[in-house]
Amino acid sequence: MPEIQPSLTTQDILCAEVAAPPNALIVFGASGDLTRRKLLPSIFEIFTRDLLDERFYLLGAGRKKLSDADFRKYAKQAIRQNSIDATAKAFNSFTEKLYYIDGDYNDAAFYARIKTKLTELDKKHKVDSSRVFYLAVPPLLYNTIVEHLGQAGLSCPAEPNSQGKTRLVIEKPFGRDLQSATELNQIIHNCFDESQVYRIDHYLGKDTVQNILMFEPVWNRNFIDHVQITIAESVGVEHRGSYYDKAGALRDIFQNHMLQMLALVAMEPPASFDADHIRDEKVKLLRSIRPLKNDSFVRGQYGPGSIDGKGVVGYRQEPEVDPNSKTETFVASKLFIDNLRWKDVPFYLRTGKRLATKDTEIAITFKKVPHSMFASTGLGDMPPNILILQIQPEEGISLSFQAKRPGSKLCMSTLNMNFNYRSVFLTDMPEAYQRLLLDCMAGDQTLFTRQDDMDVSWRLLMPILEAWQMDNSAPYQYPAGAESFPAADKLIESDGRKWRNLGTSD
C-alpha cells in the first residue's frame, strides 16, 4: 500500500516545556520493580535535559536495607539496564542527589525518621519543603502509608509559612471496585486535599494520546461511523500472577487506561487547556456513557499457544494463578455515548494479554460517502477513510484515504499518510513517566485522574463486575498468540464491521 511521509521544518516547531521548581521526590518502594524499570530512568532523563532544578533530591524509602551508596549503585544499574548511556560525570552528578532510608511501612517510627531526614535534606539542598510522595508499592499498602504520612504531619509543608507544596502520587489500580475506591479516597482526603493528589495513568503521558485534543471539526456522528480502541499485549501476566488473578483485565486495564483514552477521544473541547477544564470535560463524557449491559461485553482467557514461534503456557498454568481460575485476560465491549455529538456512534473497545502482537491504537473510521460518482465504473463501494492514532509500540498518526492513480484509466488506491514520531523528529520517544513526573513536580494535574472521574468509571463498571461475580461460567478460551476469537468477533461483526488487524495499518 503506497505511503506518504510527512516532513517537518524548524519553523513548524512550537515548544512549551517547563522545568520543575525545587522539589524533593520521596519514593516508597524505592528498591522495587517500578522504581527500577520506570522511575529512576525517567528521573535521570529529565535531569539530563536540564529540567530538574539543581536543588532537587530524591529520597528512596523501602523495606530492603540499603545504604545511600548501595542505593546509588542500584540506581546506576537500573539506568544502564534501560539502555540509557551517559558520561560518568552525569551519573555522578545525578546519583549524589539520591538518598535512602529503610524501615517497616507499618511502624510510625519509620515516618518520624523520614520526617527528620527530610528536614535535614531540605536544609542541605535549600528546598522549601516542596515534596512529592510517590507510592510505588502494592495497592494494599496505600492506606497504611497515607495514614502514617498524615499522622506524622508529612501531608502538609513542614513550616506554616512555607511556600512549598506537598503532593501525593498514586499508581493504579485505585481500588478494586466502587466501595474500595471510595474508602481509599476517604482515607486520602483525611490527610491530603484533592488538589494535592495525583492519580497516575501512564497512558495519558504518551504524546499521541495528548494529540487527540488537536482534532475536532469532523469529530462527531455526522462524519464518524465508529471508533475502535485497542490495547493488545503479547506478554502474559509475567510475575504478577497473584495480583492479576484477583484483578483481571476489566480492573487492570479497562477501568483506567481504556476509559481514560475513550474520555479523551470523545470529550467536548475544553474552554482552555486548564487542568480542571480538561478534567471537567472528561467526567462529563464518562457520565454520558449509556448504562453498560453484560450482553455488550465478552471476556476471554488465554490458553496454551505460541508467541513468535515459541510455545507458552496458558493462563491457568502461570505461577501463582489458581489452576481453576475464571479470571478474564481479555475483554471486548461495545459502548454508546448519549450526547448530541456521539449519539448512536458505536465505540468498540478490546484489551487482552498473550495476543499476536503488542499494539495500542485508537482507530476512527469515517463514514463512507453517501453517493459515489464512480459507481458506473464499478467503484461504487470504496473503503472508508480511517484515522489511526498509534500509541504502542511506536507512536504516530496515520490517515488512510482513497486517491486516483495517475493515468487515463480510473483506478483508485488506498494511500496511507504516515507520521511517525521517531522518524520525523529523529529521536526516541520519551518514556511517558518523564512527562508525568515533571507535571506532578510542577503542580500540573491535567493528565492525572480526579476523584469524580474515578468514581464515575467504577460506577459504570459495577453492573458488569457484579454480573460476572454471579456468573458461574468460565471465560471463553483463546490460544496464546491469537488475534481474536469467535465470540469477540461476533460482538462487532453482528453490526457489519470487523476488528482491525493487530499491528498493521490495515
Image: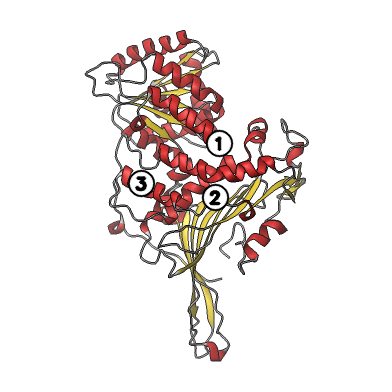
Q: CA distance from mark 2 to mark 3?
A: 30 Å
Kind of residue at badge 1: Asp
Q: Residues within 10 Å of mark 2 (few under 14, many from 20)?
A: few
- Residue 335 in the image: state x and y as whole percent: 54, 56
- Mark closer to the chain start, 2 or 3: 3
Residue 177: mark: 1
Looking at this view, is 117 or 4 the one in front? 117
Q: Is residue 40 visible?
A: no
Total marks shown come to: 3
Q: CA distance from mark 1 to mark 3?
A: 22 Å
Residue hosting label 3: 280
Picture quarter containing residue 380?
bottom right
Looking at this view, is 368 or 36 the one in front? 368
| Secondary structure state at the residue bearing disc 3 | helix
Q: Residues within 10 Å of mark 1 (few under 14, many from 20)?
A: many
- Mark closer to the chain start, 1 or 3: 1
How are the residues colored?
secondary structure
- Residue 367 in the image: state x and y as whole percent: 49, 72
- Mark closer to the chain start, 2 or 1: 1
Question: Is residue 379 rendered to the left or right of residue 284?
Answer: right
Q: Report the residue at 27% width, 58% height from top.
A: 11
| Secondary structure state at the residue bearing disc 1 | loop
Name above or below for residue 499 compared with residue 275. below
Name above or below for residue 293 compared with residue 80. below
Question: Is residue 54 rendered to the left or right of residue 285?
Answer: left
- Residue 38 in the image: state x and y as whole percent: 50, 34
Question: Is residue 362 rendered to the left or right of residue 493?
Answer: left
Residue hosting label 2: 393
Looking at this view, is 162 or 35 the one in front? 162
